[in-house]
Image (tube, grey):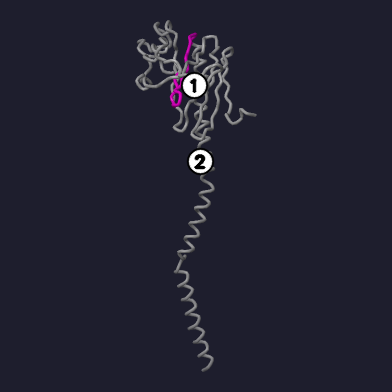
Amino acid sequence: MKRSNCSARREIVGGESARSGLHRDARGYTLLELLLVIGILMIVAGAVTPSVLGMLANVNLKEGVKKVQSALGATRVHAIDATSSYQFRFEPGGRHFLALPTDPDALNAQGSALTPDGSSLARGLFEAGMLPETLSFQVVAQAGSSPETPPLPAGSDPGWVASLARMPDAHEFASAAWSDPITFRADGTGTDATFVVVDTRGAGYRFTIREVTGEIFIHPLETESH
């Protein structure tokens, strides 16, 4: 009889323990535990976010630099293929760039630079584009000139004006304040010129064009002092 009483007590205690365990499992996490987890996640996110944003900024910067490099190289090739002068201009402090044939004789004659009806420039024979949103062009003052000296108005260049008027969607570029021209000639030579492409962090690349060879050199701004 005593043995059965003991067994009954053990069953009761065991049952209460099981129910107590189920109750604890159902209870879940306390508010303090949740706040602790959230705090850890916020710390990790805070540590990782700057690195991720920096990587994205570098990707945008390199994308913009490749666009400009490609456009400059294509402009030089256009000039050689068309045996005509081409001008590359950019928007100081802005994002637009544009390269057009500017030889008046070539523009006024029916030729490969124009559509069959002569009304506009043939697509593929000009370069037009825009930098990513966080990037901009900046002018680099040449030796002996003042950085405050604005470029001459592009509207005073008859070749540029005539070519721009024949651009498809010319109205999109009409309000831009263009830089001085970087000219590429039919023999592959160019204009001595330097400008930079920078992002909102101040990181960027310097473009340099050599007159004698028409070569294009690109260097990161942060390595120029080495």
Residue flagged by tag 2: what amino acid is it?
Leu
Please identify the quarter of the rendering in which residue 177 is found. Answer: top left
Residue 219 at x, y percent in the picture: 58, 26
Residue flagged by tag 1: what amino acid is it?
Ala
Q: Is residue 170 magenta?
A: no
Magenta residue span: 82-98
Q: Which residue is mark 1?
A: 71
173 horizontally vs 186: left or right = left
Residue 105 at x, y percent in the picture: 42, 5
Residue 44 at x, y percent in the picture: 53, 51
Q: Do the residues under discs 1 and 2 have CB atoms within 8 angstroms?
A: no
Q: CA distance from mark 1 to mark 2?
A: 27 Å
Q: Residue at x 43, y 21 (%)?
A: 128
Q: Which residue is mark 2?
A: 53
Given residues 97 and 200, the one toward you in this image is 200
> Mark 2 falls on what kind of element?
helix
Q: Is residue 116 above or below residue 16?
A: above
Residue 19 at x, y percent in the picture: 46, 76
Given residues 112 and 225, the one toward you in this image is 225
